[in-house]
Image (cartoon, rainbow, N blue to C red):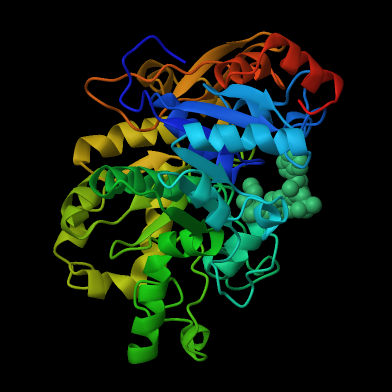
Amino acid sequence: MSTQNLPLKGIKIIDFTHVQAGPACTQLLAWFGADVIKLERPGAGDVTRSQLRDIPDADALYFTMLNSNKRGLTLDTKTPAGKEVLEKLIKESDVMVENFGPGALDRMGFSWEYIQQLNPKMILASVKGFSDGHHYEDLKVYENVAQCAGGSASTTGWWKGENSEPTISAAALGDSNTGMHLAIGILTAYIGRQQTGKGQKVAVSMQDAVLNLCRVKMRDQQRLERLGYLEEYPQYPHEMDAFKDKVTPRGGNAGGGGQPGWILKCKGWQTDPNAYIYFTVQGHAWEPICDAIGKPEWKTDPAYTTPKARQPHITEIFATIEDWLKDKTKFEAVDVLRKFDIPCAPVLSMKELLRDESLRKSGSIVEVQHPVRGSYYTVGSPIKFSDLKPQVTASPLLGQHTDEILGELGYSKDQIATMHAMKVV
Ligand code: COA
């Protein structure tokens, strides 16, 4: 909560979410000014408060990094008194976001039909593993399950050798990515409501959100079925067997677009697991690449002058660049290559990112004060505005704002005390 006049100020959101997918969505909206009320079960709260704790009895970083800028309300919504509070909240709010297992909200008595009766302007936003009507719609889903169901795992990793099984990405493609899609859906429904006066249900499935980011692999599948090979994959042209079943193969660290690329070793790789750069052989940058790596003769050699001519030699080209890299750290290498306008970057470790001065300066990594755990670092808004600099504030303690929120709903001090005594809040 900031003193700035933030664009989403005045939008009231019931944040009935847990773990990562839902909280990432509502946190984004809270950064931009929405009043986000994190609704949790009394006593326990979101499971991430206690998962992977690094300080005894303090909310875990898993929770604090996904729930900043929110207010905290505890409420047992399965009790009659708790249901009544939720009904009041629904009547006064604009959006309710949830990511419970399939059917949980209905079982609690808050079907979409009932929510609409309570507040026809309400936008109900849901994350589920699979979309409504999907043959797996009943499944509960976590991150890695979604990565497998959405096409990411089958297309990530190595295609041969000991570790050639489908591979999970460390990026939260199933969780936070789905939350970001949902945030776009909520804002779209909100703008739609300004035109129609009516709310609507917005849903994003984790499978769909992963698939949306894997669209280039679906492009490749269709090309493969038509052509029988994928010329930019490392298997082409020396391992054509990889294409015989016409299933998009895993491509290791190959570039996903029309530019061949690979992760290359730099000085110190023997002891530093991240002493690498990503190097892209962009078509029109071929001549600068030859100059940068000391191979001017490749500029006129017909075996190298076009992307098609280079493809059979791509492994040899990368090996030559790696030889050039062997006496340069990843940072030194990038400093040379940037002068030649070659698309590249060091492989950065989490340790390096956490200490990166540019990320601190831009607000992409911020330091936050928390009443129990002290100071910690978290990600700030990756979206930058010219007239808005979102301030990240601490996540709420369990039930921190319960009395304040119940007071705003019109409950008296005595009624609130009774709810505490009955463990409704
Ligand atoms: N008061 C009373 N009951 C509450 C409550 C509250 N404040 N908050 C939650 N509950 C209840 C729910 O009503 C539900 O009860 P029910 O199963 O008896 O109907 C239960 O707590 C939560 O169930 P569920 O969401 O299924 O939790 P889970 O721990 O078994 O499963 C997930 C966790 C993430 C697998 C599941 O929620 C899911 O598949 N969510 C959708 C996909 C998703 O978002 N996954 C990624 C999370 S990062």
Q: How many marks?
A: 0
Where residue 233 sits, quadrant-wise, is bottom left
Residue 65, image x, y percentages: 59, 28
Residue 362, image x, y percentages: 36, 20
Q: Quadrant of the C terminus?
A: top right
At x 42% / y 13%, what residue is drawn? 2
Q: Identify whether 311 is placed above or below 111.
A: below
Asked if residue 172 is positioned above or below residue 348 in the image, the reply reads below
At horizontal 63% and vertical 36% (from top left) the residue drawn is: 86
Instruction: Tell whether 254 sits left or right of 303.
Output: right
The correct choice, above or below, for 347 with respect to 296 in the image is above
Q: Where is 313 relative to 116, above or below?
A: below
Residue 62: quadrant of the picture: top right
Q: Is residue 179 left or right of residue 271?
A: left
Expressed as whole percent of the image width and height from the top left, the position of residue 360 reads: 43, 18
Residue 30 visible in rendering: yes
Q: Nearer the viewer, residue 104 or 394?
A: 104
Q: Is residue 142 visible?
A: no
Horizontal side of residue 260 vs 302, given as left or right: right
Q: Quadrant of residue 337?
A: top left
Q: Measured from the top left, where is residue 321 in percent x and y?
A: 37, 51
- Which residue is at the front of the view, 43 or 157? 43
The residue at the point 70 percent across, 54 percent down is 104
Q: Residue at x 68, y 65 (%)?
A: 163
